[in-house]
Image: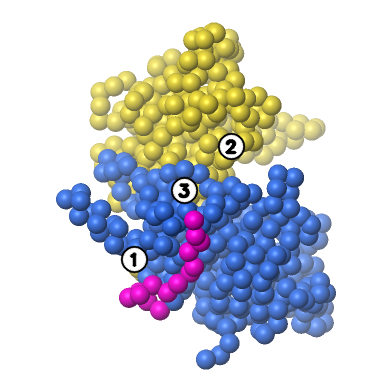
Amino acid sequence: MTRPTSATSSADAPLVSVRDLTKHYGGGRGFLGASKFAVKAIDGISFDIAPGETLGLVGESGSGKSTTGRVVLQLESPTGGDVLFRGQSLVGLSPRQLKPFRREMQVVFQDPYAALNPRMTVGDFVAEPLIVHKLAKGSERADRTAELFRRVGLDPAFMKRYPHEFSGGQRQRVNIARAVAMEPSFIVADEPITALDVSIQAQIVNLFQDLQESLGIAYLFVAHDLSMVRYLCHRVAVMLRGRIVEMAPTEAIFTDARHPYTRALLSAIPVPDPDIEANRRHLAYDVDANPPAPDAALREVGPDHFLLA
Amino acid sequence: MTAPLLEVKNLSVVFDTEGGTVHAVNDVSYTIEAGETLGIVGESGSGKSVHVLAMLGLIPRPPGRIVSGSVLFEGRDLLKLSEAELRNIRGGRIGFVFQDPMTSLNPVLTVERQLIEPLTRHEGLSRRKARERAVELLDLVGIPSADRRIGQYPHQFSGGMRQRVMIAIGLACSPKLLIADEATTALDVTVQAQVLDLVRDLKKRFGTTVIWITHDMGVVAGLADNVQVMYGGRIMERGPVRSIFKQPHSAYTWGLLRSLPHGETRLTKRLYQIPGQPPDLTEPPVGDPFAPRNPFATPRCFTETPPLRQIEGMAPGHQVAAWYDLPALLAAEQGTER
């Protein structure tokens, strides 16, 4: 199949490469040898992420976008295909072999409270990876932790407090501080602002952007809020039923969408402008009638613009 | 002029908790005319959800307590009704749809049972008539093969379809007033778009009055005639949707609208961010609740609560609770930047 070989116009080697990745749940042989139906959460997707780049992964619930994030991080093993980090395959590595990669690849989840340990001070929580990876100890560790707090916009005086004393936005800052503690080159952010109040979302989005500018972190930004995706991402991949149906530089997705599903998705975003809303028409896309064809492959239809056809 | 359909007067609600008294709703007053769609916007702790739950008699008491106020609906004060009388109004004259259809539907009863219940109870229909009407309703909200699917259980429906079932139940008795609280928040955007189209269609066909509670300014822009922005248990600004979006007079409304991306990319600018955190309502700030986060706050904002007042020169009904003149301050700021 044709697949995108270069993620951006830059000549940089990709930081992360995903090749023909599949993840099926169930299936195989069931009771009495009857073959069971497998759910194809990811069904053969490929993409690259360059150092310092943000790739947005959008789609609806059940499209496979969150599963993709977990498989890329090797939190789940794929059914088929490969995930390469700096050119090295991660699939099939033992936990011990994965450990050096774990330092470089971090994750920030949707629910900022569920990820925290309620009985650990937020300072200890942020410092924990420094301990696990033996990166700093004693006063040096305390200094590093304080520096991380400042970096994400939290007062280091908060280090001795517990998660319940914080608001949702502050908790997400704590999670981001921990992710950044390892000086990662890649973060999977899975709906990181969805659970936050509107007045706080912009704060966190700006923080992600500042960290990218100062530390050169690449992101896989998994989201359903397309207006934030447009703001934050360099490129966008649209997932439907475990497949990528379209992938392009962000502006091309928003101004020159080719796949009818991408168009339907874009037409459904509510715009905070009564005049635009008064004249809008929602485009429908019947996935059941038009599922991605099993033999379809991504084809380049414009500069760096790929369409499943 | 006819009396409004709903008139909320000086409603205050508190919760007595171990950490102190939470002042969730503070002196909220507003009216809704028949046929109007009011969008109520706010974030967690704004009082937007709690105040409607309180007027429907749906907050647990204790810890909840209605400290003051009245809620006149078709001339009767809902806060003075008995539980039995309220039950007659809920699901009857007032329909409601809440965020999570899985917890609002009873998982062990078929959709048929749950749809027929309000119809036999409030409308006095026979079971056979009620079933016919129930199928019509499912059809109306766009559930395919309604006649067959009505016999199924909630878990057999997808999230979007369950929310349609909830809306069908909310509409079952042709309510005068439909209250929806984050009814589409958990849905995918394409499903949300379908549900919003459905609500617009129902308004047109039946003249239903709607209160649509959401945190999504985009949804409000597309659905509401009037907008009410709440913060810290108070109404900060209220008025016709165009007037509010084109020229907000509350620094909170302005900040909310400005912090949303409007189709720009990171290359063009940073997102405006409202500084600070939402208020702690066990110790509600004195004065304007938004003052601690408001770059335009005046000394008076920290000492005295501003009343909601009509803004001179703006559309009738465009009201703000603010001591400062936001458009003048913004114009002055632009002047100094140049």
Q: Residues within 10 Å of mark 1 (few under 14, many from 20)?
A: few
Q: Which chain does yellow denote in the image?
A: A
Range of magenta residues = B303-316
Could you tell me the amino acid type at mark 3?
Answer: Pro
Query: What is the spatial separation of the Cα atoms under label 3 and label 2, in whole angstroms?
Result: 18 Å
Q: Main secondary structure of the magenta part?
A: loop
- Identify which residue, B318 or A262, lies in the foreground: B318
Residue A131: x percent and y percent? 57, 12
User: Dot 3: few (<14), some (14–19), or many (≥20) neighbours within 10 Å?
Assistant: some
Q: Name the spot of residue A176 as percent of width and height, x first.
A: 49, 29
Q: Which residue is mark 3?
A: B292
Q: Is residue A193 magenta?
A: no
Q: Are marks 3 and 1 on the same chain?
A: yes
Residue at the limit of the structure toward the bottom, as seen here: B1
- The disc label shown at residue A135, or none: none
**Relative image position of residue B246 (x, y in whole percent):** 34, 66
Question: Are dots 3 and 2 on a single chain?
Answer: no
Chain B tint as drawn: blue
**Residue at the image point whose x is 24% and y is 57% from the top:** B332
SS type, badge 1: helix
